[in-house]
Amino acid sequence: MEFSQAVPDQAVPGTGSGTDDQHAAVGGAAPVVARRRLGAHGPEVPLLGLGSWNTWDRMTTEEAAELVARAVAHGVDLFDVAHYNFGPHAENAVTDILFGEAVRAAGLKRSDYLICGKLWLWDYPNTGFAGQLDTALERVGVDRADLVVAGDYLGELDVRAVVTDVAELVRAGRFDAWGVNNWPAAVLAEAVRFARAEGMPEPVFAQLKYSLARRSVPEGEPYGELFADGLGLQASDVFEGGILAGKLHPQRKIGADPGGIRDAIREAYPEVRRIAEGFGATAAQLAVAFCLTHPAAASVLFGASSREQFDANLGALDLLARHGGELREAVEGLWLDRGVVAPGASWGTDAP
């Protein structure tokens, strides 16, 4: 059974005040982005969050400081920050270090923002989680995270060891809650069962590749069962490295291409733009708003390398408020990995 439910208009963010799922103006200041609970047992997070991969190294420190300060002022205080030096990310990236410099330059206190870090499985258990976390936090210049994501799934995993190791870090106060990045649904279900049976902190969300074009995993039946059981969804790579926002041939390194559909996504961009313009929106706004129509979605991560990009992407929430109940039907033809990527798969596994 494939996901097909559209969010009704009254359930999406709007303007004014009165509910958590609306924009609210605080003391006449900038509108503050609404918050949702990240799964049944996770923390409240803003509907929008900022990613760090190949992001902060495209700005000066002053520009980055202005951006993070503006984001926090709007309630976008969730930052996905990782030490990208494992597996395919062994590229000596310094975006995490630059993020730390930016928040300090902006004069932000640690209590002003949330950090979602990553624990990589590429060399686990040889490279233990505690050491990874120490290094990652030191590079940013903080002493703890708020959330962490364990990923990516490689095909062989001692799930019980992962749950146990993560539980030790939670109990040590290194972070409060955790999730997974692109795990197969069955493996994640095993982790949840084991954690519950042992009284350990269970993964409360999944960070999944999710976009107008890539829906088979987040909207498939295997993950649907997990969402119905209380798992939250954090959407990532919603722009396909910029392609769905109009940058058809990004110069920077972008994410994996499960199913080999990237060229088809490029070819579909004119249709993305046409649909967006029909709603009085940009392609990027359509890409973000669509992901928030998923009932389990608590936050959408996107990259912004300028204040102007960030401000424009905030417009996705107005699009959602005006046309949330219409978006899914309008973009149905853009689902490009249907029948190509298996619904229960990890990010890199194709359907048979």
Image: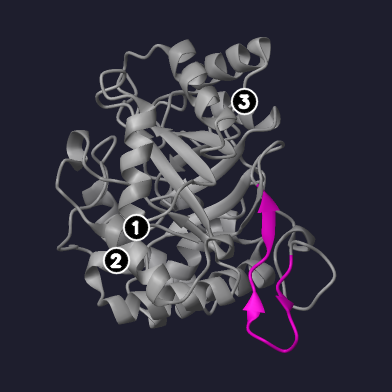
Which dot marks residue 210? none
Which residue was labeled with disc 3? Answer: 201
- Amino acid type at circle 3 is Pro
293 left or right, relative to 211: right
The residue sitting at 44% across, 13% down in the picture is 161
Mark 1 vs 2: CB contact within 8 A: yes
Q: Nearer the viewer, residue 288 or 263?
A: 288
Question: Which amino acid type is shown beneath numbered disc 2?
Answer: Trp
| The N terminus lies in quadrant | top right
Q: Quadrant of residue 242?
A: bottom left
Is the residue marked by circle 1 packed among few (<14), some (14-19), or many (20+) residues within 10 Å?
Answer: many
Question: Which disc number belongs to residue 52?
Answer: 1
Magenta-drawn segment: 22-37
Find numbered disc 3 in the image and state the secondary structure of the residue it sits on.
Answer: loop
CA gap, disc 3 and disc 1: 26 Å
Q: Magenta stretch containing residue 34, yes or no?
A: yes
The residue to which callout 2 is attached is 56
Q: How was the colour assigned to the protein in this rendering? A: one colour
Nearest the viewer among 297 and 85 is: 85
Q: Earlier in the sequence, mark 3 or mark 1?
A: 1
* Residue 294, x across and y down, in percent: 61, 47
Instruction: Relative to 287, say whether 277 is above or below.
Output: below
Question: In whole angstroms, how far apart are the C-alphas of marks 1 and 2?
Answer: 6 Å
